[in-house]
Amino acid sequence: MQQQRQSQYRGNSAQDMSRRMICGGIAGCIAKTVTNPLERIKMLSQTGEHGLKQTSVISLYRNIIKNEGVIGLWAGNGANLLRIFPAKAVVFSTNDLYQDIFRRLLSTNTESENQSDPQNLQSQKLPGSMMFLSGYVILYLGTNHLVT
C-alpha cells in the first residue's frame, strides 16, 4: 500500500508541486491583501508621512479614507503581491517535501507518521530559508534591472 502511494506520488510530483506553488502563492496574496490596510496605517505611523499631529490608528484610518478614499487603504498592495507570491509559493510547495526528506533521513521506522519536534523544526527551517533565498534573488534581479 505504501509503495503504491509512493509511486503514485512520484508520478504526479511535478503536477503536485505546481499545484502547491499556485495555491501557496494565492493564499499568501489573499492574506497580504486582507491585512494591507493595517500595514499601510503602521507604515504611515512609523514614517511620519501622514502630516497629522495625532497619530492614533483611528485618526490615520479616517485621514486615508478622507484624502484617498477606501482604495487608499490598499495603496502599494500590488508591489507587495509581486514579492509575496513567489515567496509563499516556495514555502508552501517545499514544506511537505522537506518534511518527507527529514522523515526518511532521520527516522528509523518508516511506518511512523509521528515526527519528533527537532525533525519538525528542521523541516520548517528549510522552506523558510528557500523563501528567503528566492525572495532575495527576485529582489536583486528586480533592482538590478531598474538601475540599468
Image (tube, rainbow, N blue to C red):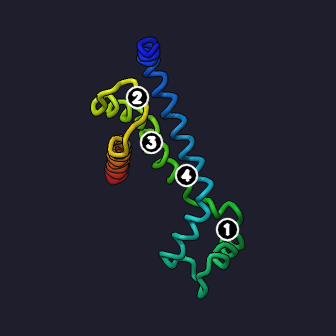
Viewer-side residue, 130 vs 120: 120
Q: Compute the Cα span from label 1 to label 4.
A: 17 Å
Q: Disc 2 on helix, strand or loop?
A: loop
Looking at the rendered structure, the kind of residue marked 3 is Pro
The residue tagged 4 is 78
Q: Is residue 141 shown to the viewer in this render?
A: no
Residue 95 rendering spot, x and y as whole percentages: 42, 37
Q: Is residue 101 shown to the viewer in this render?
A: yes
Q: Which mark's residue is nearer the viewer, 4 or 3?
A: 3
Q: Disc 3 on helix, strand or loop?
A: helix
Look at 45% across and 11% down and name the residue there. 4
Residue 143 rendering spot, x and y as whole percentages: 35, 52
Residue 89 rendering spot, x and y as whole percentages: 46, 39
Label annotation for residue 112: 2
Q: Disc 4 on helix, strand or loop?
A: helix
Looking at the rendered structure, the kind of residue marked 2 is Ser
Q: Compute the Cα span from label 3 to label 1.
A: 29 Å
Give whichever of discs 2 and 1 has the lower sequence position. Answer: 1
User: Is 50 placed above or below 19 here?
Assistant: below
Label annotation for residue 68: 1
Q: Which mark's residue is nearer the viewer, 2 or 1?
A: 2
Viewer-side residue, 92 vs 48: 92
Dot 4 crowding, Cα within 10 Å, few <14, some 14–19, many 20+ = few
Q: Compute the Cα span from label 2 to label 1.
A: 56 Å
Residue 119 rendering spot, x and y as whole percentages: 33, 41
